[in-house]
């Protein structure tokens, strides 16, 4: 039997003062111990006002990624690449975190975790100042199938 991780986006929020038109992608790479699979969820340009939390557009989409043998402990590397869309110059930022997971043994219940990944985006050109922090909550569910 093989472990599979279902990767989806749950919630997005914004703190900061540089704009409210955002697009981003979140990539998940699973290692156990080497790379076993990867998947990306892209979120198109949409409105996200500072101080708001909301489900991202297309929040129902998910990606299933192979994670190696059941009963093992894979790691998931999450990378977010975010863009605050401006009229002249778009502002970009990225961040990477690594999340340890547990793949249940055969017949075991799924293991679920919902990590949050943040990315700071700074206004360009820099003399305008300002920055914003985009936070994306991800759902990772490991199941032995």
Image (cartoon, rainbow, N blue to C red):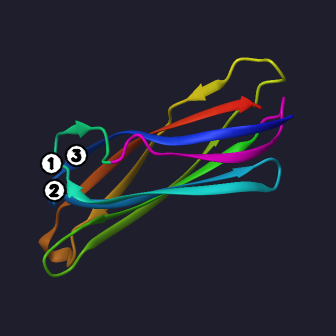
> Which element is circle 3 on?
strand
Please identify the quarter of the rendering in which residue 137 is found: top left
Quadrant holding the C terminus: top right
Please report the bounds of the magenta region as a residue range. 58-73
Image coordinates of residue 33 in percent, x first then y, are 83, 50
Front residue of this view, candidates 143 and 111: 143
Left or right of residue 17, residue 66 in this image: right
Looking at the image, which residue is at 24% across and 75% down? Answer: 90
Count residues near mark 1 (Cα–Cα under 10 Å), then give few for <14, some for 14-19, many for 20+: some
Q: Which residue is mark 1?
A: 49
- Any part of residue 102 in sight: no
Image coordinates of residue 84 in percent, x first then y, are 24, 65
Count residues near mark 3 (Cα–Cα under 10 Å), then give few for <14, some for 14-19, many for 20+: some
Q: Which residue is mark 2?
A: 20
Residue with the most extreme bottom position: 88
Left or right of residue 96, residue 125 in this image: left
**Mark closest to the chain's N terminus, 1 or 2:** 2
Q: How many marks?
A: 3
CB within 8 Å, label 1 to label 2? yes
Alpha-carbon span between mark 1 and mark 2: 5 Å
Left or right of residue 16, residue 95 in this image: right
Q: Which residue is mark 3?
A: 15
Residue 115 covered by magenta stretch: no
């Amino acid at each position: 039997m093989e472990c599979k991780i279902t990767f989806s986006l749950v919630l997005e929020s914004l703190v900061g003062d540089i704009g409210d038109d955002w697009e981003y992608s979140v990539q998940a790479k699973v290692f156990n111990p080497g790379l076993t699979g990867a998947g990306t969820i892209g979120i198109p340009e949409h409105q996200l006002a500072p101080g708001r939390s909301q489900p991202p557009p297309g929040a129902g989409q998910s990606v299933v990624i192979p994670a190696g043998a059941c009963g093992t402990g894979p790691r998931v590397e999450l990378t977010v690449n975010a863009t605050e869309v401006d009229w002249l110059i778009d502002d970009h930022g990225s961040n990477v975190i690594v999340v340890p997971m547990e793949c249940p043994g055969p017949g075991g219940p799924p293991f679920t975790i919902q990590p949050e990944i943040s990315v700071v985006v700074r206004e360009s050109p820099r003399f305008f100042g300002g920055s914003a922090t985009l936070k994306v909550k991800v759902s990772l569910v490991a199941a032995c199938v």
